[in-house]
Amino acid sequence: MKMKISFKDFATYFFSLFFPNRCIFCDRLIDPFEDYCDECENTVHFISGEICQRCGMEKADCNCKSKRSIGYDAVAAPLYYDGDVKSCIRRYKFKDRRNMSKALAKLMYGTLKERFADIDFDYVTYIPMFPKKERARGFNQSRLLAREISELSGIPFGDNMLIKLYDTDNQHDCTGLERTGNLIGVFDFSGNYDVKDKTVLLIDDVKTSGATLKECGKMLYLNDANSVICLTAAIRNSKIESQK
């Protein structure tokens, strides 16, 4: 029996002749139809099992005592922000590897189906960037992820639902309470959507302290959203970092 090759598969293969496909984690050359290599599949720490929905970490790693977070109802991610995952996110954001958004979004969509299958979302939106910084980078990495997840899930895409009013220091350059103080009063709701009594899926690339998600979530709640659920590509695990 002859195997049918779709136009999409042919296009993927043809494109790979000129732009070889690489593992999103270790950056090695891989098959055109794969997102990551077999070695990384076995070594990268995928978040699995029961999680704490307040911090998104596996129960064994959680130390937040599962208190409800102000700013969102739950958060989850497919990966811990460590090792090759950290390198992956940095290449995506700072080396203009925006094509990686599809692979990361597929992992996030898998987590969405696993963790929040019983929730009916009205919108999927994202953490905004300050316009000047977005122009300098050429894209908003969280927007690309949200758009891909919208296409995968069928959840309506809430583009420009939130806005960033002021430029701030990068969150990864801040520590402790500085992360929260750095963002107070920085975000606002655009008014382009009616979120009253709606459930919103809020997307970001990485959750570190959760301060960014909380501040954006607050803006949605202030505009009468019923629930805010957060989904990121990766979550920082301070327990892992402290063991190094």
Image (spheres, helix red, strand yellow):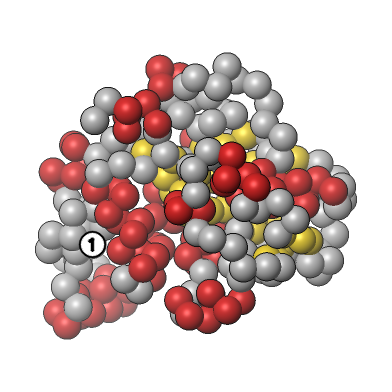
Among the 4 quarters of the image, the one containing residue 164:
bottom right
Rendering coords of residue 180 (x, y %): 63, 45
Q: What residue sits 24% from the left and 48% below the top?
A: 84
Q: Residue type at mark 1? A: Phe
Residue 35 visible (yes or no): no
Task: Answer left or right for 57 relative to 196.
Answer: left
Q: What residue sits 13% from the left and 43% below the top?
A: 39
Does 48 appear above or below 93? above
Among the 4 quarters of the image, the one containing residue 30:
bottom left
Task: Answer left or right for 83 relative to 59.
Answer: left
Q: Quadrant of the C terminus?
A: top left
Q: What residue sits 71% from the left and 59% below the top?
A: 187
Task: Answer left or right for 201 relative to 97.
Answer: right
Does 135 appear above or below 196? below
Among the 4 quarters of the image, the one containing residue 210:
top right
Q: Quadrant of the N terminus?
A: bottom left
Rendering coords of residue 102 (x, y %): 40, 62
| Foreground of the two, 24 or 243 | 243
**Neighbourhood count class around disc 1 (C-alpha, 10 Å): few under 14, some 14–19, many 20 upward:** few
Q: What residue sits 32% from the left and 33% below the top?
A: 241
Does 106 appear above or below 13? above
Rendering coords of residue 209 (x, y %): 53, 39
Please name the residue that numbered disc 1 is placed on: 33
